[in-house]
């Protein structure tokens, strides 16, 4: 009898231990699920705020006063609300190097500034030219079908214009570090052989041949000051007939970085163009990309130096 009581006690203790473990596991799973749900919720909130930054930028491009509209030259605009901050940066595609139109000299200057050894610079430039031209003639140190086959690649040059910036990664000799470096400096939406230096940011200006570094710094400072004071943008000291009003951009990139009070972030990049049919929609969207939260933040000290204006949320409704 005593033995049976002992066994019953052991069984009860075992059941209680099992129930305790199950309860603890259930509570842990619930906490994990709650954390996941909370994370999804905050990410969705940050995404919605970043999307509102894109919408605000589009609205601020439609103003009647060309000196009051937001400029697409790399300056940053900040909108503050009770729950979040948004920073928006706009970059005209005409202020970038068009990889479908740029001549060999401009592409060579771009590669000369890239993190790549001298021997590979010419090969990449020639390979880009071979990729986009319509023939199978190989530029000096370039690459056509045979060179891609010899490299063990299962594809060949399109012999057509680049359809996206990402397509550059397929060019023979292109590597990840070089692509990431040149990606913010190039475009397929400009349609121009040369860069509109009035709209270019500092990083692009620094790779254009023949532009003095001191003049670039002075121009960037003067242009930023004119935007802050609602004055016309100054001409670049050595430019000739390249002035284009920000309101006349054919296409531009909008980067919206949302930072919530709890530290959640969302970063969105969109390439838009003014619509030919404004009655249907004022803008056409060419590209919409969610960038990683670890990407280039607009809330760094370097970006703060490019801050044009700060707004309280209600100001944009007036």
Image: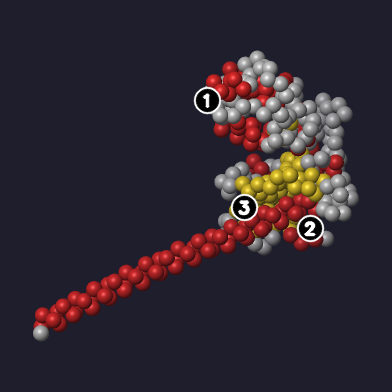
Marks 1 and 3, Cα distance to the nearest angstrom?
Answer: 39 Å
Mark toward the start of the polypeptide (1 vs 3):
1
Tell me if residue 94 comes above or below residue 318 in the rendering.
above
Tell me if residue 262 comes above or below residue 173 in the rendering.
below
Left or right: 249 as drawn, with respect to 162 = right
Q: What residue appears at the point 62 percent right and 60 percent down from the top-left corner?
A: 45
Q: What residue appears at the point 34 percent right and 70 percent down from the top-left corner?
A: 22
Identify the element where label 1 is drawn. Answer: loop
Coordinates of residue 135 in the picture (x, y in percent): 71, 21
Left or right: 237 as drawn, with respect to 213 = right
Tell me if residue 6 comes above or below residue 161 in the rendering.
below
The crowding category of the residue bearing disc 1, from other C-alpha atoms within 10 Å (few below 14, some 14 to 19, many at least 20), is few
Identify the element where label 3 is drawn. Answer: strand
Coordinates of residue 97 in the picture (x, y in percent): 73, 30
**Residue 266 tag number:** 3
- Camera-side residue: 167 or 110? 167
The crowding category of the residue bearing disc 2, from other C-alpha atoms within 10 Å (few below 14, some 14 to 19, many at least 20), is few
Residue underneath mark 1: 152
- Foreground: disc 2 or disc 1: 1
Coordinates of residue 88 in the picture (x, y in percent): 71, 48
Q: What residue appears at the point 64 percent right and 27 percent down from the top-left corner?
A: 157
């Amino acid at each position: 009898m005593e033995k049976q009581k002992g066994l019953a006690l052991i069984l009860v203790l075992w059941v209680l231990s099992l129930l305790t473990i199950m309860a603890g596991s259930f509570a842990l799973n619930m906490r994990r699920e709650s954390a996941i749900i909370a994370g999804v919720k905050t990410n969705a909130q940050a995404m919605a705020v970043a999307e509102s930054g894109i919408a605000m930028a589009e609205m601020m491009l439609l103003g009647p006063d060309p000196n009051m509209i937001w400029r697409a030259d790399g300056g940053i605009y900040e909108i503050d609300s009770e729950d979040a901050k948004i920073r928006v940066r706009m970059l005209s595609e005409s202020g970038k190097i068009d990889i479908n139109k740029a001549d060999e000299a401009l592409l060579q200057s771009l590669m000369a500034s890239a993190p790549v050894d001298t021997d590979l610079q010419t090969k990449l430039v020639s390979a880009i030219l071979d990729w986009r031209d319509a023939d199978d003639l190989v530029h000096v140190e370039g690459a056509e079908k045979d060179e891609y086959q010899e490299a063990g690649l299962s594809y060949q040059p399109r012999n057509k214009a680049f359809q996206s910036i990402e397509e550059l990664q397929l060019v023979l000799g292109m590597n990840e570090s070089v692509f990431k470096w040149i990606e913010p400096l190039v475009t397929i939406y400009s349609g121009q052989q040369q860069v509109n230096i009035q709209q270019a940011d500092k990083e692009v200006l620094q790779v254009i041949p023949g532009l003095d570094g001191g003049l670039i710094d002075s121009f960037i400072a003067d242009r930023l000051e004119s935007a802050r004071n609602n004055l016309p943008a100054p001409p670049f000291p050595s430019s000739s007939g390249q002035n284009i009003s920000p309101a006349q951009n054919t296409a531009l990139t909008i980067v919206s970085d949302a930072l919530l009070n709890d530290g959640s972030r969302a970063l969105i990049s969109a390439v838009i163009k003014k619509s030919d049919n404004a009655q249907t929609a004022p803008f056409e969207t060419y590209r919409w990309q969610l960038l990683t939260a670890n990407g280039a933040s607009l809330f760094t000290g370097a970006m703060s130096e490019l801050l044009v204006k700060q707004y309280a949320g209600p100001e944009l409704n007036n």
